[in-house]
Image: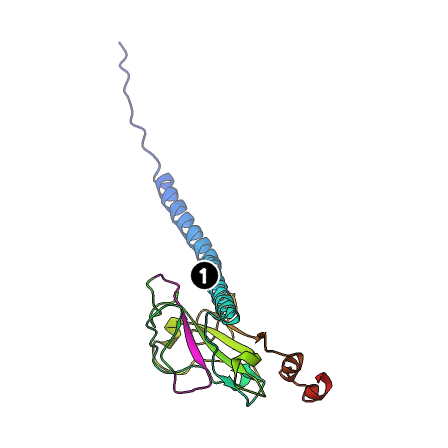
Amino acid sequence: MTQLKLQRIQPHSGEAGFTIIESLIAIIVVGILLTAIAPVIVLSVGTRVQSKRVELATQAAKTYIDGVTSGSIESPPITQKDSNLIAQVNAPSGNLNCKTDNEYCSSPKDKTYQVYCLDGSGDGTCKKDDPKDMLVQAFAYNPSTDEANSGYRLGIRVYRADAFKDGKSLEKSDDKKKATQSSFSGAISKLKAPLLEMTTDIASRNTTFADFCSRLENNKNTNSQCK
């Protein structure tokens, strides 16, 4: 009777080695792909976060302007020196002390502006280590009077509260360059730059057309034309 002998099939050593090499190549390819797309993912997330900050700053500015217009928020200091508010008024500096949401913070040494707290984190105050809290630096201009009832040009800059954490001066735009942050994530590192800068005219029942004309920038002869 013929006995059948089962022979164990031995895999060729070359096949096992090829599988390991193939796995290593796959890992390398995946690593290269991840390295290539990681900056895109980080940039996308950073841009989304920065866009949200700019949106919050815009909402803070609108809230403040609405409050000043309605009279629920006291007007900031009104200067008669220069109409170019954004370029002339200093950026805020010093320690931050904001006790309550929707209130002005402790008076700065520079009396040409005030800083208003808008709580974004929901804890009722603005803290210098909280990036969600927004601070509105407010200042005003009227060449004729410092009375708010006569109307004025309102200038505002909106900063993150954590920009004040070291007590040093913040950045601002001037006649030569614009300092505001962009919604693009490349501007995230500019912590001390304002998220928003703008001016608008605030009027009251006592504001005349001549008052408005006198505040127009770069038109020194407007008063005589509007009377």
Q: Residue at horizontal 27%, vertical 20%?
A: 5
Find numbered disc 1 in the image and state the secondary structure of the residue it sits on: helix
Q: Residue 84: which quarter of the image?
A: bottom right
Residue at the disc numbered 1: 49
Callout 1 environment at 10 Å: few (<14), some (14 to 19), or many (20+)? some
Q: Residue 225: which quarter of the image?
A: bottom right
**Residue type of the residue flagged with mark 1:** Val
| Residue 69: percent from left, percent from top | 53, 70
Q: Is residue 198 left or right of residue 164?
A: right
Q: In this view, does 64 lie above or below 11?
A: below
| 127 or 153, nearer to the observer | 153
What's drawn in magenta, residue-wise?
Answer: 108-122
Q: Is residue 8 left or right of residue 15?
A: left
| Residue 195: percent from left, percent from top | 48, 71
Q: Is residue 175 left or right of residue 45?
A: right
Q: Residue 207: which quarter of the image?
A: bottom right
| Residue 160: percent from left, percent from top | 42, 71
Q: Residue at horizontal 31%, vertical 32%?
A: 10
| 67 or 137, nearer to the observer | 67
Q: In this view, does 142 lie above or below 50?
A: below
Asked if residue 59 is among those painted magenta in the image, a careful observer would answer no
